Image: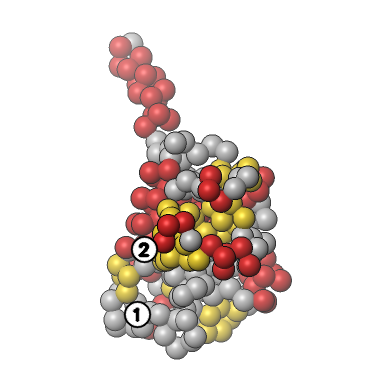
Amino acid sequence: MRHHLLLLLLLALLPSCAPKATREYAIATAYRYTQIEWMPEERHVRHGKDGQGIEVKTPDASIPRGWWKPGVPAKGMPYQWGGFDTPDSFLTKLAEGKKAGDIGDASKRKLGDAGTSMESCGIDCSGFVSRCWFLPRPYSTRELPSICDPLKSWSHLKPGDILLNHQHVLLFAGWLDGGKSVAAYEAGPIPMWRVNASGIPVRKLEREGYAPWRYRNIVD
């Protein structure tokens, strides 16, 4: 009886032990995606259709803004259209021979989810933000406003918030140049098709239609 009660008590405590969507967790998760190290192989390359007839183009060095090369150690998770991998699941899939990434283009945008190859691995921009917020599934750029609130001013941004336009999303990390630029994490495509951190002028982002948003359930 005591063992039964102890088991019930432990089960009741499990949810409180799970990661929460805190600002600290979001930024730490984003950083981890930039630091993952792996060894590309020829079997991770694909420029053509997968077994389901979906066109795949891995972001290896043979294409513009491609960056990884078979036989050369790589760092950072590659962009994959529709991807939602964790660093651990990415490495597992590479070991299984999955293709490393799949860039997004006009044809992929037209197909939407139907353009996602199950034979590739990596993460896309909204999947990346979804992981940083510890969401149970990937939320597309179209869906993110349904779980977020718009911010009245860019000055209200805090680490873990996002900058969103109609087809891309960035995770805000902080201010640079006295507030003239933002430090942000993103999953490609600029400057390369991978998860990276960069400084971006606010004026450039405003010209491209980005606006500040905040996940409703993020914890300060």
Q: Which residue is drawn at 42% across and 57% down?
A: 178
Give the x, y percent position of residue 126. 56, 58
Does 128 sit left or right of 33 as displayed?
right
Quadrant containing the N terminus in the rendered view:
top left
Disc 2 residue type? Thr
Is 119 on the left or on the right of 198, as rendered?
right
Label 1 and label 2: CA atoms lie apart by: 20 Å
- Describe the element under mark 1 as helix, strand or loop: loop
Mark nearest the camera among 1 and 2 is: 2
**Placement of 190 over or under 157, stated as above or below:** below
Residue 43 location (% of width, % of height): 40, 80
**Residue at coordinates 65% horizontally, 48% vertically from top-left?**
145
What percent of the width, then of the height, locates residue 200? 48, 66
Does residue 114 appear in this view? no
The residue that appears at 62% across and 76% down in the rendered structure is 105
Query: Residue 111, how many percent across, how many down?
Result: 69, 70
Report crowding for label 1: few under 14, some 14 to 19, many 20 or more residues within 10 A (C-alpha): some
| Scheme by which the image is coloured | secondary structure
Q: Mark 1 points at which residue?
A: 41
Q: Which residue is drawn at 34% across and 83% down?
A: 70
Question: Can the viewer see residue 56?
Answer: yes
Sequence-first disc among 1 and 2: 2
- Amino acid type at mark 1: Glu
Q: In which quarter of the image is residue 67?
A: bottom left
Q: Name the residue under label 2.
A: 34
Q: Is 51 on the left-hand or right-hand side of 45?
A: right
Query: In this view, which residue lies farthest toward the bottom?
Result: 62
Q: Along the line of sight, which residue is nearer the eye, 208 or 196?
A: 208
Q: In this view, does 11 lie to the left or right of 128?
A: left
Q: What element carries label 2?
A: helix
